[in-house]
Structure formats: C-alpha cells, structure tokens
Image (cartoon, rainbow, N blue to C red):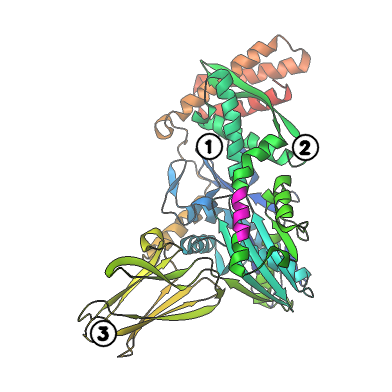
Amino acid sequence: MAKQGQDQSFRPIIGIDLGTTNTAAAYVQKGHPKMMEMADDQYMIPSVVLKESNGKIVVGDEARSALVAMPARTIASIKRNMGEDVDISLGKEMYTPEEISAFILKEIKRVADEQLGEGEKEAVITVPAYFTDQQRQATKKAGELAGFVVERIINEPTAAALAYGAQNLEDDNSVLVYDLGGGTFDVSIVEMMSGILEVKASAGNHQLGGEDFDWLIVDWLAEKVKKEHQVDPREDVRAKARLKEEAERLKIELSSKESVEVSIPVVTVKADMPVGLDTVLTRAQFEEMIKPLLAETKEKMNQVLNDAGMKVDAINDALLVGGSTKTPYVQQLVRDFLGQDPRRAVDPDEAVAQGAAVQAGIKAGSLGSGLIVTDVAPFSMGIAVLDERRGREKPGAFKAIIPRNTTIPVTRTEQFTTSFNFQTTVSIEIYQGEERWVRDNYFLNDFLLEGLPPNVAGAEGVGVTFRYNLNGILEVTAKSITTGKEMTITVEDALDRNSDTAFQDSLAKVESAYGSDEDVDDIFDEEEEGGASSDLSKEAGQYKSQLVEELGNREGDVKKEIEQTIAELETALSKEDSTLLHDAIERAIDLSVDLEL
C-alpha cells in the first residue's frame, strides 16, 4: 500500500537543499511544494555526522550535540570540502567529502521512504551557483551513494526563484536573489516574464557564509579569555568547539536583541584549574566584525548588475534566501543597496528546498505550473591556447568558448588553427574559470584529435564545439575542417575517472557504516587520538574539583545530585574508561549549567 503523499503514477522525485549548516527536502503534493518533516515538527536537520563508538553513523541533532564532547567523532560543514581530494577522519575511519555528504543524504532518503513509501526515488539537489564542475559532480556522486537517482543538479538561487515564481506566475518582474547560507553566498538576477523564468547573471563565493560569522565571534571570545587568563582556548579542541557552539547562539540571539550575555563556567583549563568567561557581546560589535565580509556581497551585487547589463532601479523585487539573511545588518545592506525592502514571500530556510521540489515536479509532470526555466553557466569554459603578444608565443593561455553567465543550454563553436609545421595531432585541454592562464583555472579533461593532414603552421583548421546543458554536463567536440574527422568527450565526472570499482567501493563503505551497529574499538584510544583519553580524564578532574567546592554551599536534593555526579566522575576516572568519562562529563556539564556555576 502506498503511504500518504505518494503518487503511484510516477517514481517519486524530491528536491533537496544540501546545506552547509542544515539540510532540508520537499516534494510536490496536490500541485504545491510541501516540506518534508524530519523530526519533532522540524523541516531541517543539522548537516552534522557522528560516528558512535559502536561504529554506527548518526546524522542530525544528536550528532550536532556531540560536536563539543566528541570532536574526533563528528564532522560539520562538510559542504565546504566538496570537490576537494581530501580524506576526513571520523574516529579511526577515513571518508571522502562525498561519502560524508552521502550519510546526510541517506538520512533524507530514510525519511522520504517513511513518508512517500519504500522504493527508488529521484532527486533534484541544489548547489551554490558558484560551485565548480568538480563540486557539482561531487554533490551528484554523494546523492547516488545515498541511493538516489540524481535527476538534476540546480543552482540554489535558481531554486529559490522557482519557489517564488511558482507563487507569482502572473507577475513580470526582475528579481535579485540574495542567498546567504551557513557556508556559501550567491546572488543572481532573475527575470520573470509570462511564465518564463530566466536567470540573467550569477556571482558568489562558496567560502562565505554564517560559519564565517561564527568564527569571528569565536576569535573575539578567545581573545577575551587570552587577555584575562593568558591561555588561548583555540589550542584546545574541545574548548574551541565549545566557543563555536556559543558563537552560534550569540549570532542567533543578536538578530532579536541589542546585546547578549556570555557566561561559560568552563571554557578551558590552566594549571589544572577551570577557566571561565563572563562578558557581553553587543549587536554593534557583531556588525563591526562581519562588515568586511558583507562588503564582498555588495561587490557581487554590483557585479551581477553589470553582467546582466542592468541598473539597480530596474530591479522590481529582492528575495532573501538562507538562514544568515535573518541577520538585521544583512537585511539593511540589501535594503540600502536596492532602495527597497527585500521580500520574504518564501521562508528563507525553506525557499531552496521548495524550489528544488518545483523543479522536480515540473520534470515529473506532477506540477502543471507552466513555468519555463533557463539558467546560466556559472563559470567560463574553454581550452588552452597559445598566447601571441609582441611577436612571441607562450603556451597555456585560456580561451573561453562559453563565457560565464551565458544562458544555458547552449552550443558554441570556435575555429582554431595548427601552431607548428606538419602538425598531425592537436591536444584539447578543457578548463573552467576566469583567469588568463589555464594554470589558475580548474582543469576538467583533455583528449587528442589525430589524423590532421601535415601542413605548414596555421594552414589546418580545427573547430572546437562546446555543448553545455541544464544538468551541467559539458560535451566537447574537436573537428578537422579539412578531413571532417572528429573526436568528442563528455565531461560528466572530473573527480573520478577511475572504473566503476571506485564508486562501488565507496557505496559499500557508506552502506556498511550507515547501517552498522557492531562493537568496534573505542575511538578515544590514546594512541589513535593523540591523548584524547587523557584529555577526558583532565576535564573530568576539573569538573570534580568544581563540584566538590560547591558541595558545601548546597543542601537537600541538590546536594545529593552533586554527590552522585561526583561519584560517577570518580568511578569513570578510576576505570579510565572513555565512554564512562564522556557520560560523566556530560552529566557534570548539565548540572553545572543548572546550578549556574
């Protein structure tokens, strides 16, 4: 039997906003996008992954709660590593960014199976408009590792505009979409006319977002501790995580308050004594911190206007997207730039997921919206050529064949000639980027066109054609003008050019870890974690000393609770058991907070 919300006439397709801080999903129900409920009436889950001591993978709120106590077992903000050739440690295991992202997406798949019925599901997954080909393909791979058929990768501001456009089909507007999330920033200009939604230009920075605001606060708090106690808490992994958690709270509260008190009983330790922090952070101080970062977003708004050939007064509406746009200073910056109040027609936390669902619904035929969508190429794409200046030739110059912000899908052809006498082969090296030299751009792929007739330099022509579609798939063809012989390559996965074996190995690794509940060695082993067990013992001793000192000031049930917590700490210390130490410390932290120590 199909569950509520499932339409058996087609394979379910869901839209997923795979965010730096949080992840959300939506699907089309009765002609409208509907957010998928994750847990406890929440429509988002934290994009945090925890590997428990038994090897089981946990995603979401529980994982986020473990960031401070178990930093070696948890990872957050993995989106910022997408497309990088790096390994990330979770306990004793190493994972790629795609594999960790797949854990998050598998949690979305689990919820989707519960709500829409078991079985194969397609997904439209969003990425920042300024994600490179490597980052897009890494995102696609993560979705496939999670068990989705990844139908399309679309840009986040485009998705947000889709959510807006689905509600305003009759309007003819030029809309600026300002998307500032936890880890990325995008700005796009979208033109809506008679049901056609056309992205005119996009710009952004995939390393700019609310996370950067948090770390600025962390530095501010750490400098306070350093100045007062001559110890830098950023050198203590748990203290740093504790300050990061506090920074997130402060940032959120400063959206509605002019100042927020900071009171942390134990930030770190010095000479085996706890070091705390009591201070106040004002909104004005916070705004001063983030002002340089937000100045860049203003520059990007100017850039997209220039790229679109528009003046600021041609913008009819502004759409704020992403959790970081809740910051009053951000809203004021956009208001001042455009001379109008930005719109909140769609929840900034839900707009991208809803828009992805709209795209999914259009594809599936479950949404008769009448919307037609075009997008733009976020980066220029081209090939390596000779640079000829002052009579000298230098190899390695970049020639764009599809300039950035070209409307897609698109096909472009450029003509080139041989560069030396009797040349019979030509190497086509494909790059993505905006720099003059290919060494400063992203290498995508290369291939050889052979069989050119031997001739003098410049006599033989080669046509190079780029075809770029809405899924971000680039097809490149090189063709000899004389013989008609051609060679074509499709740039679908610049990250993994190995055989399917590599993908299957990752798939088995993800499936095994996500479903694991077998006992494994404790990852707080001192040899493996560089003294993490010793750090736990030190922290437990600090809390024990603090509670012993407080014991004489309390009576009745509170005193008994303190005594019980001290006993648990002593037991954990005597057995030197990492799990017991962690649990006892967690209880001591909770009690310290309750007692306002």
Crowdedness near tag 2: few (<14), some (14–19) or many (≥20) residues, C-alpha within 10 Å: few
Q: Quadrant of residue 499?
A: bottom left
| Pointer 1 with pointer 3, Cβ within 8 A | no
Residue bounds of the magenta highlight: 295-302
Mark 1 / mark 3, whichever is N-terminal: 1
Q: Amino acid at mark 3?
A: Leu
The Cα atoms of the two marked residues, 1 and 2, are separated by 30 Å
Q: Quadrant of residue 430?
A: bottom left
Q: CA distance from mark 2 to mark 3?
A: 71 Å
Number of labelled discs? 3
Kind of residue at disc 1 = Pro
Q: Nearer the viewer, mark 1 or mark 2?
A: 2
Looking at the rendered image, the disc whose residue lies closer to the viewer, 1 or 3, is 3
* Residue 452 image label: 3
The residue that label 2 is drawn on is 257
Q: Position of residue 333 (x, y in %)?
A: 70, 50
* Residue 313 sits inside the magenta stretch: no
Three-letter residue code for mark 2 = Lys
How far apart marks 1 and 3 lie (CA) works out to 58 Å
| SS for callout 1 | loop
| Quadrant housing the C terminus | top right
| Extreme residue in the bottom direction | 483
Query: Residue at horizontal 61%, vertical 49%?
Result: 295
The answer to which of 549 and 501 lies nearer the viewer is: 549
- The residue that mark 1 highlights is 71
